[in-house]
Image (cartoon, helix red, strand yellow):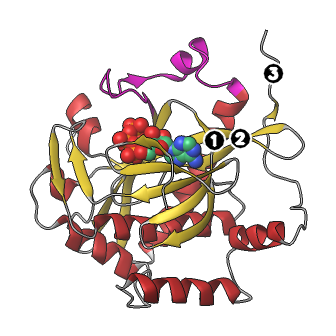
Amino acid sequence: MSRRKLYEGKGKILYEGPDPGTIIQHFKDDATAFNGKKHAVIQGKGVLNNRISEFIFVCLEEIGIPTHFIKTLNMREQLVKACEIIPVEMVIRNVTAGSMSERFGVEEGMLLPRPLIEFYLKSDKLNDPMITEEHVLSFDWALVEELDEMKRVALRVNDFLSGLFLAAGIKLVDMKLEFGRVYDEEGNLYILLADEISPDCCRLWDIETGEKLDKDRFRRDLGSLEEGYREVARRLGVLEDNVTEESAFLKKLEERRNQPTAPQSEKAEAAKKKGVKKPAGKASPGKKPEKE
Ligand SMILES: Nc1ncnc2c1ncn2[C@@H]1O[C@H](COP(=O)(O)OP(=O)(O)OP(=O)(O)O)[C@@H](O)[C@H]1O
Ligand SMILES: [Mg+2]
């Protein structure tokens, strides 16, 4: 089956989806760091990220956070809602680490008194420079209502995921989130969580030992990246089905979809196929202002 490639990034490929307004996200095995300067192919990384990100997005949908996730298609791919990505990466930090420690000369591992939100411009060419909310508004990268909604959702995601990871013996040190805008059936514009949430874009430390289970293993040559990601997936219960073959995976997926406890997003998808209208009620910053 040939399908149109829309974009190839460092970690994923986007293909045109089967229905208008949908996109297929394909998770690659490529690992990159320092804006692509360091690169390697890590067998199995794409599969682990696909499954971890699916698990997290389904949990977030369950607590009412609008996300782009529709359903998993196979071991490496998921169907998502196409959206207009807001060109701002939001980083939420609970503990000092990485570029923050370097920038402000603070040691890594200090618990922050409250979650700290940073903004970066999504631009590989400019090396994703740090920006402020004022830049976001001045350059019209997002409306003030959108920015408020993004911050509200980011803090909620952070609280929820901090607890989820804590229960798995993992400290959520920081994470990067991306948001997009999309229209609902009534023509209202709303903000949803897009891209991925995986050890590629979170810092995850073992609570007991402090061992790094995320991409810093690759950035800092701390050992097998795949092992760290696998450990995160195992602790979240994502690998409980013990499936490593594509055909067995697809069979399990079908079984899961037919269960009465199937995730909301998949239920909505099934309902849509049967022609049932999804109830409204997504958080909405309002109608898109008319362009002059
Ligand atoms: N639902 C969506 N609709 C449209 N684009 C999306 C959606 N979800 C994610 N994207 C975009 O798809 C791309 C995914 O590719 P990848 O993560 O490999 O990019 P990247 O090389 O990391 O570059 P970037 O710095 O732009 O994220 C990202 O640019 C991301 O913003
Ligand atoms: Mg990316």
Which residue position is annotated with label 3?
289
Which residue position is annotated with label 1?
83
State the extent of the magenta-drawn residues as a range: 119-144
Residue contact at pointers 1 and 2, CB within 8 angstroms: yes
Could you classify mark 1 by the number of other residues whose Cα lies within 10 Å: few (under 14), some (14-19), or many (20 or more)? many
Disc ID at residue 140: none
Which residue position is annotated with label 2?
182
Instruction: Describe the element under mark 1 as helix, strand or loop.
Output: loop
Q: Position of residue 164 (x, y in %)?
A: 50, 71
Is 134 in the magenta?
yes
Could you classify mark 3 by the number of other residues whose Cα lies within 10 Å: few (under 14), some (14-19), or many (20 or more)? few
* Image quadrant containing the C terminus: top right
Please tell me which residue lies in front, 98 or 23.
Answer: 23
Q: Residue at x 44, y 86 (%)?
A: 247
Instruction: Describe the element under mark 2 as helix, strand or loop.
Output: strand
Please tell me which residue lies in front, 195 or 235.
Answer: 195
As drawn, 102 above or below 48:
above
Q: Position of residue 260 (x, y in %)?
A: 74, 88
Alpha carbon distance from label 1 to label 3: 17 Å
